Amino acid sequence: MTITLAHYLAVSGLVFGIGVAIALSKRNVVAVLMGVELMLNASNLAFLAFSRFSGAFQEGTEPLAGHTFVVFVLTVAAAEAAVALAMAVLIYRRRETVDLDRISVLRW
Amino acid sequence: MESTGIVVAFYVLSAMTVMSALSVFLMRNLVHAIVFLVLSFIGMAGLFVTLSADFIAVAQILIYAGAISVLLVFAVMLTPLASRNNGNSLYAAPGLLLGAAIAAIVVFTAIDVEWNELTGTALEERAFLDTISGIGDLLLGRYILAFEVASVLLLFALLGAIVLVTDRGEVDTEAEAEDGASGAVAADDAV
Amino acid sequence: MSDAPLQRSNDSAQRRPATPMAQQILDRGSLLDDAKAVPNGLKAAGAVLGLGFLAVNAAIAFIVIDGRLDGEWYDFRDLGNAIARLRAELDDTSAGPWLSYWVTGVIGAVGILSFLGGFLLIGSWIERRLLARFQIRMGPNRVGPFGLLQPLADALKLMQKEVLIPLGADRMLFYLPPILVFIPAMLAWGPVPWAPNMSYLDLNVGLLYVISITSLSVLAIWMAGWASNNHYALLGSMRTVAMMVSYEIPISLSLLVVVLLTGSLNLGDIVAWQADHNIWLGALLPFAMFTFFFSSTAEINRTPNDIAEAESEIVAGFHTEYSGMKAGLFLAVELGNALLVGALLATFFLGGYSMFGLEEWIPPYLILAAKATAGYFAFIWLRATLPRFRIDQLMSFAWKYLIPLSIANVLVVAIEASIAARWDVEGIFIYGSFAIVNLGITAFAVRSWAKVVGYTPDLERPVGTRIAPRIGGLKEAKRIQAGA
């Protein structure tokens, strides 16, 4: 059985959906961040799959542009994780809780 | 990609990744969830290797499993014992529904669309032999503006993480210094 | 034993050895006396074996120069030739490359494991006897001849101990760390090149692979401390995690300058560069070598950076609650990691398997093993000599000294690499001048940066140092005994 692009995209979609479910439905700030990291990972997988399998490229781009974009996504993910976790620690200090059900200042 | 080795590797690794991601959702204990998240990162790195993206695979292990997981661990350590559960919030149902819907849509699209991808010998010829020089050429050639902006972003994230955690000019506990340091380290490791 | 009372004066006529053990050390003599006391038959056998080995290698080398034996499978100076021949044979069978991949993979893994297992048996003995000799005492000498069976006795003791799991410890996370800390220690041996054709994983990203695999052990150590349900274990593991994560950056930066000069992340290419240009990267990049060496002691939790398992401070740090073979695995991994870092130091900075042409006469894997053992000896020497650093001293050293100086090092070496790429000067002149310039810049930068950051020595420099003639030690004691 041959592995095609569809297989990789299906895996990427599954992991992305799980990441969305985690990010939207968890009570803990750190858990929400874990969901976001899973989503970014899934998008990296999709980029690399297209870079490997794709047939036609516009002039001026090349297959390794997918890899380059993944490098940027890795960078941004690391930076965003650092800042988000610093904010999580700060939230705990101000409000004595990291339960997202209680931190609801922006709700209706 | 028809050879037995790569097919078996793909199925094993993708099963490992998806199961670990599901376990992150289902585990009650936050620290167990982090361990399964690291397992899913390693599975992803394996999938990157099957796509002959060697540099990205080791960069993924270095950045995600080596640095971001340590950040998550530090954040869990600095939060109170009572809040270390991974339960669902009260408004969890719409989130679950949306996640399932997105997964279903993407999987259906992946299977149904005519991708016109390379197959057979053209695919074998595409297998990257030397990704690093190619990525380096692109990063310092065509995409140099994005590269510089990414370095500025990392600098701001580094400074921001330290400034956020520092307590108005002085660092009074070692834990805060470590947290700032670890935040700075994870951002720095991504360079 | 003499009846004379203990003398404290400096009068040499009345000094006696204070304890029976001191007398025993005096009687035992030096290593040269030990070497002379080996029976003649053993000496003859050793001479025959050694010379015979050299003769066989010389014969192979002559035939290679003659041109008839070049990479044949029986050229055992490079075992990769035999493996390549085996792989070619297996590829021709009906199973295809799948079978050859698995068979050669298993052979390589068994080879690495047996080398490491053998080293673990003898390395523990080497370490304890060497530490004892540095501290002017005798190491273990009871268990076998010269105490050679001591590591085996330690292993048997650990195996039969009861494994206690503390109450309230997280079961799943308690069982995992000994395994998880062993896996990176094994995997990182993959890219190390033992001979031109003989690396288990010839990766194009070998250097980055090594860095990323060693960063996986950070998680295992945190898990060990957290799962123990013990405040001190958790404290020790958090300190260790912070230290290991901080020292990854100087390691990466010092390996970055290696990549700048050699132009490749492949470990085999790095060694080939050093062989081609006839210069060791350690001579060319002294600061990078020192940074790599010192940061590796932090990565593998050895003195002077072993704040994690400082026995006098925090019982045993993150592996306090582990007993039996679990603790044995932690100790074994520490030993294996020390040899791994010795091998990596040899590969990156000391020329790897090449030795200015000697690798045609002696098998290259033996040269690399000798260099790795020399690196291990340097680690033991460092452990015997330096006291332990405090955690805040460690962190400030990494962040305020090593990282800025490493970044400046990258700048200087980048300039040099671009000069070397443009000018067409003969290799030895340009790299020799780089070596001298780098040494000068290193000395100047270290001194001036220390002043900038505000380092002041604690003690005043004594005026007019003298070398005291009566400090002690074996020679002094013998002199006193002869004179007494």
Image (cartoon, coloured by chain):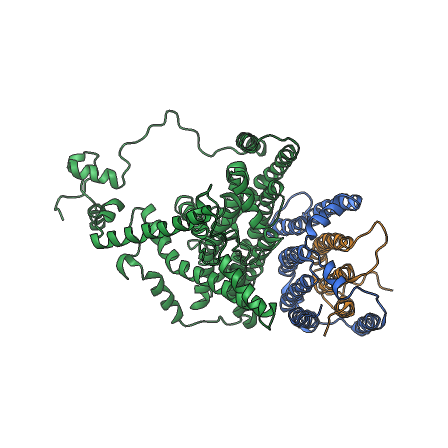
Chain colours: A orange, B blue, C green
Q: Quadrant of residue C400?
A: top right
C256 lies left or right of C167: right
Q: In this rendered view, identify the residue nearer to me: C50 or C246.
A: C50
Residue B50: x %, y % from top left: 68, 64
Tally the numbered discs.
Answer: 0
Residue C262: x %, y % from top left: 60, 42
What is the quadrant of the C terminus of chain C in the image? top left
Residue C202: x %, y % from top left: 58, 56
Q: In this rendered view, identify the residue nearer to me: C57 or B51.
A: C57
Residue drawn where x is 21% and y is 45% of the image: C26
**Residue extending furthest toward the right:** A108
Q: Quadrant of residue C433?
A: top right
Residue C374 visible in the displayed image = no
Q: Quadrant of residue B82?
A: bottom right
B18 lies left or right of C331: right
**Residue extending furthest toward the top:** C464
